[in-house]
Amino acid sequence: MKFGFSRLMSRSALVGGAVAAALVAAPAIAKDKIDVAVTAFLTGPAAGPFGVPGKQGAELIINAINGGTMPAPYNTKGFAGAMLNPLFTDESGGGAKQVGEYRNLVQKRNVDAVVGYISSGSCMAITPVAEELKKLTIFSVCGTPRVFEEGNRTYVFRTQAHAVGDSIAAAHYVAEKFPDVKGFTGINQNYAWGQDSWKFFKLAMAKIKPSAEASSKPQFPKIFAGQYGTEISALSTDKAEMVHSSFWDGDIEAFVVQGLARGFFRNKKFVSVVGGSAIDSLGKKFPDGVVMGTRGEGGILLRHNTAPLNAWFVSEYKKAYGVFPLGPSYQYANAILALKMAMDNAAKAAGGFPTQEQTMAALKGIKYQGIGGEIALTLGNGHQAVHPVGYGITKWDKEKGEPTVTDVKFYGTDCIYAPPGKNSEEWLNAGMPGAKC
Amino acid sequence: MQLITTMLLDGLSYASYLFIVSVGLTIIFGVMKILNVAHGAFYAWGAYAAAFSITLLADNEYPDWLGFVAIFAGSIAVGLVLGSAVERLILRKMYHEEEVLIVLATFGIFLVLEDLIIITFGVNPYFAYQPMALLGQVEIVGIFRDVYSLSLIALAGVVALACWYGLNKTKWGKILTVVIYDREISLAMGINVQMVYLVTFMVGAGLGALGGAYVSPTISVVPGFGVDVIVLSFAVVVIGGMGSIPGALIGSLMVGILRAVAVHQLPQFELFVIFAVMAVVLMIRPEGLFAPEKQRTI
């Protein structure tokens, strides 16, 4: 009897397993429409330079995909045939508020996926909740590497590379373009993004340009502080001739305005990891000679690039919104493209409309064509993207009457990211073994 | 010498900013016993009014000095229009309510005014750098400084003197002092307390707006930037003693100079310093440095 019961249980288990496997493998019921939350700063200091361009980038791509008007390889209509209905939500208010909003989106509004988030603070707060609620979430902008280096994620993906690549690329650029630099300091916002950016830039400089000494007094003002008079004085009295900054949002604009009034940019070489938005908003007031990055292939570095997808994006964006797309416009667009590519691939494999699990399986480790270049989710067990990162030097183009960058150079993914499975900080400390630059 | 002078000037400059912003808050509390959370919104409205006017003037190629007119005119307009609207339409109906309810009401007003900013001005930043560019820069002990930020010190001095003169040397100041000490007796003596409250609130709102308007040429004016100001102003006012103008002045100087020392010497303690000062003062003298223990003064 005991044997019989065991056999019965074994058979039941086998049947149950087979049914479960079939359910997992089976496509979901086809949908005409999917609801996807798209979260960005729509109010607050980060809205103008980051949130709104990000939302516009997502909106443009969603409309084009829903309408079937995107160029190849995204020229099929819809997301696995379904129209994407975006629910744009505001990222402002801090981590606790965002967690509440996220729960509301998933549990009350039953969204099919969540895309977005600009601040590293938001991403750090959302990650455990997304895993708990088991909802596909694609981060589009935030940069702290901790999201995937402090744990394995199942439901969370990021289509934007993390801060380590930005910092290493900046260090390479500085070493190549300014070989005489003897010292550097920094001004970065006092939270995950700013602290990580400085830490990795300092580590990268120690390996790539060891003759340049890091200041013992880098500045870490509060995010959205707005007033930097004292910090500018402190940086001016520091003997380091180069200043690294990962300021973004209204902070970079305020810093530049205040620094300009004090001749700061005449006396210090300024390296801005992600200050591209300020170039357009300040126009000819923005100082020439700033080392400028856009956290990847986008923004002002690719403004006049003629690759078909990029040219289409720039042209359509200008038509729709009357301005050039900024870095966040590209980053949100790339996150939406990843969702489309994964859903389309998953639908092909499943032979019908994909389940969330099938979409996630297709998204894991995906390589796809982003607006500015190829994006590959090779880190974080296939959840974290890498892509080349470039820098240039700002210059106001008098003839065209628009800002531009010169001496643009991109650094490949083999050069600026730790290999899969390696911790970035340990890899940097070890001298970046295996890096191919 | 260079370091000490630089720290002192940085500290004075920041303290001046803090004083101009917090003096309106302390005046309103001193006279009306209202902890006005909407003060941050007046600050933001002042900044937007000034930045919008300055950019408009610049776009139409008017002379840059008119930007200064826009700064003061914008502050006065915010004080007169928003200050009187808030006092007459909302606060006047709540004076008999508990203080905590009035604080909540001012918080609600803050949120509404912040949203009105987005509706009116949008989310894109405003840059009104023309007044700052006009005044140029000056080299002091080897460090370039913008004259505009130094002029903030002069403005704070003028505001402090005006407050002292207004309170101690004018009839209006005597009336205000009477209302502060006893509202009921003031009413019995025929003082129009409602008018005193209205004018006080408009002046307080106008000073908050002046703080925002005067710093607007130095910053990127964006939605939500009035939030931090409330926290900073409260810290200054609590240190100096709520309702005390000399307290606001000394609180601003303490915070400004200690923060400057921290930024130059121990940057990681910059945020800590402001609230550490507040905590220490509250431990030693819970009513603040300059507030009398038994009665409120201004």
Image (cartoon, coloured by chain):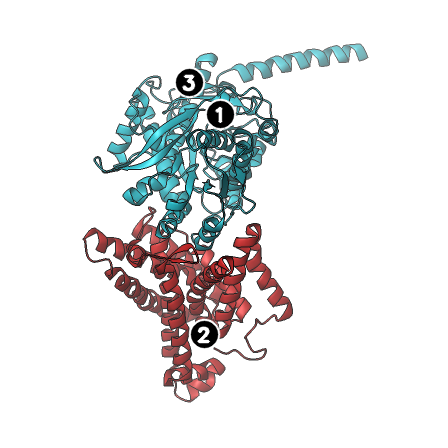
Chain colours: A cyan, B red
| Residue nearest the observer in this picture, A359 or A224 | A224
> Disc 3 is attached to a residue of which chain?
A
Give the camera-side residue of A190 and A129: A190
Asked which secondary structure carries label 1, the reply is strand
Q: Is residue B1 visible?
A: yes
Res A78 quadrant in image: top left
Is disc 2 surrounded by few (<14), some (14 to 19) or many (20+) residues within 10 Å? many
Read off the residue under disc 3: A344
Q: Is tag 3's residue or tag 1's residue first in the polypeptide sequence? A: 3
Q: Which residue is mark 1?
A: A385
Q: Which quadrant holds residue A398? A: top left
**Same chain letter for marks 3 and 1:** yes
Which SS class for mark 3? helix
Q: Are marks 3 and 2 on the same chain?
A: no
Say the numbered circle drawn on residue B32.
2
Q: How much space separates mark 3 and mark 1, taking CA atoms?
A: 19 Å
Tell me which amino acid carries mark 3: Asp
- The answer to whether residue A40 of the structure is visible from this angle is no
- Label 1 marks a residue whose chain is A
**Whole-percent x and y of residue B114?**
38, 55
